[in-house]
Amino acid sequence: MKSYKKYFIIPEEPIIVYKALTNETTIQLWTGEDATMSEEAGTEFEIFGGAICGRNIEFIEGEKIVQEWYFGDQEEESIVTIKIHEHKKGSSVELIHTNIPDEAYDDITKGWEEDFFGSLIHFFEEE
């Protein structure tokens, strides 16, 4: 199991970034895929048309999202923590993803950079 930590600068204020990550309709806009999301701890979610699924653990509006991502039968939970901070260019987003299966690590990290946050940044740049 591996962990991944990275910072992303997103050209929008923290509350808007938070809503883009937690609002089902907005997620569908920036991913171009179906999404199921609820801003309620304990609920299941699916994004990118079900390619990513898991369970919501914690929400602090405008500041923090904690989720468990599912990778089949794995002993340790794979936890994603997203912290959003104000930044002079909009928001600084700190991503910490723990317990990524070794065989999925390269695909997951590339997905974070290109598909997930890459798409979100592009979405706000195009507004």
Image: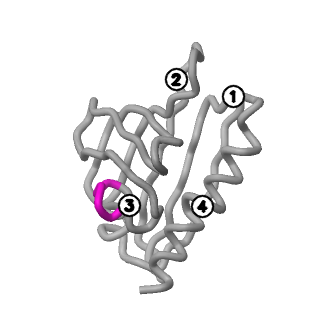
- Location of the C terminus by quadrant is bottom left
**Is 19 rendered above or below residue 54?**
below
Q: Disc 3 versus disc 4: distance between alpha carbons?
A: 23 Å
Confirm or deny contact between disc 3 and disc 2 (CB under 8 A). no
The amino acid pointed to by label 2 is: Glu
Q: Which residue occupies 38% across, 47% down? A: 65
The amino acid pointed to by label 3 is: Gln
Secondary element at image label 1? loop
Secondary element at image label 2? loop
Residue 38, picture quadrant: top left
Q: Disc 1 versus disc 4: distance between alpha carbons?
A: 21 Å
- The answer to which of marks 1 and 4 sits earlier in the sequence is 4
Residue that mark 3 sits on:
28
Secondary element at image label 3? helix
What number is the disc on residue 101? 1
Pair 3/2: label in front:
3
Q: Main secondary structure of the magenta part?
A: helix
Residue that mark 2 sits on:
77
Q: Disc 2 versus disc 4: distance between alpha carbons?
A: 22 Å
- The answer to which of marks 3 and 1 sits earlier in the sequence is 3
On screen, residue 81 versus residue 39, left or right, reads: right
Residue that mark 4 sits on:
7
Confirm or deny contact between disc 2 and disc 1 (CB under 8 A). no
Bounds of the magenta span? 22-27
Residue 39: % across, % down: 25, 46
The amino acid pointed to by label 4 is: Tyr
Residue 1: % across, % down: 70, 26
